[in-house]
Amino acid sequence: MLKVEIWSDIVCPFCYMGKRRFEQGLAQSGLQDTVSIEWKSFQLAPDLKGSREKSLNQFLAEHKQISLAEAEKMNAHVTKMALQDNLAYRLDIAVAANSFDAHRLLHAAKSFGLQNELKEALLAGYFTKGLNLEDHEQLLRISTDCGIPQPDVLEVLQSTMYADDVREDIDLATANGIHAVPFFVVNRKYAISGAQPPEVFQKTLQKVSAESNQENPL
């Protein structure tokens, strides 16, 4: 069994593209049944205080100290890029949001075997529907729709559960020199940085699988 750990932020547009390309590469490798995936937490803007009043375009303009028109142009370019991965981004309606609570829920989802499902739902909700991922009602609905029991979701949202797990993921990333996401680590041996083409993931997975078979022959 190969293990792929993926550091990613739910509000990172390239992380959703990277997820799609990884999935394509995994399918092309033919190793779907021998790969386990674990999503690791990462925050591009950990100090962000989200607001339903502030659009992603506004946040980007302030963060990069550029004009609103320039921010809109940048996001329009990213939207066009996402179309190549069959992702219909709506960055024009996206809102600035702190992803910390969503990451806590991803850790909770792990115990139910629903981490990948929740990751997809959160990314889709944020990038294609303009959902505010700081809104606990939205997080509750998304999580329960994925199959996580409502009492368990509420227990997380009404507490600080899994906060330490999120921070540990981020600290581990820092300790290993991971400063940008998405970042993929296969069997703690090979690393792939960024939303690479599917073929890069395919070849890496096949290489690691072949090496693993040589080290552990039947």
Image (cartoon, grey):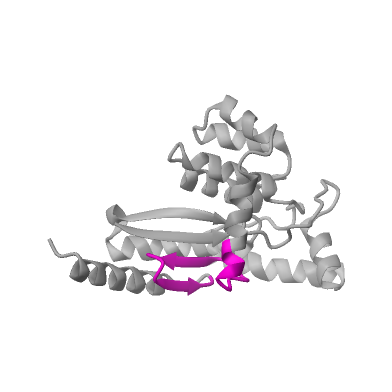
Q: Is residue 189 magenta?
A: yes
Report whether 54 appears left or right of 160: right
Residue 174, percent from left and from top: 61, 68
Percent of width and height locating residue 48: 79, 56
Quadrant in which the N terminus appears: bottom left
Instruction: Measuring from the top left, give residue 100's x and y in whole percent.
Output: 68, 49
Q: How many marks?
A: 0
Q: Is residue 114 left or right of residue 151?
A: left
- Give the residue drawn at x 73%, y 61%: 45
Displayed quadrant of residue 214: bottom left
Q: Residue at x 67, y 59 (%)?
A: 43
Residue extending farthest top: 151
Quarter holding the C terminus is bottom left
Visible in this render: residue 16?
A: no
Q: Position of residue 129 (x, y in %)?
A: 65, 47
Residue that appears at 57% across and 63% down:
172
The reply to whether the magenta stretch includes residue 179 is yes
Nearest to the observer: residue 17 or residue 134: 134
Viewer-nearest residue: 86 or 186? 186
Q: Is residue 215 left or right of residue 124?
A: left
Residue drawn at point x = 63 percent, y = 48 percent: 164
Residue 127 visible in the picture = yes
Q: Is residue 148 above or below residue 29?
A: above
Image quadrant in which you'd find residue 64: bottom right
Q: Nearer the viewer, residue 89 or 27?
A: 27
Q: Is residue 147 left or right of residue 164?
A: left
Residues rendered magenta in the picture: 172-194
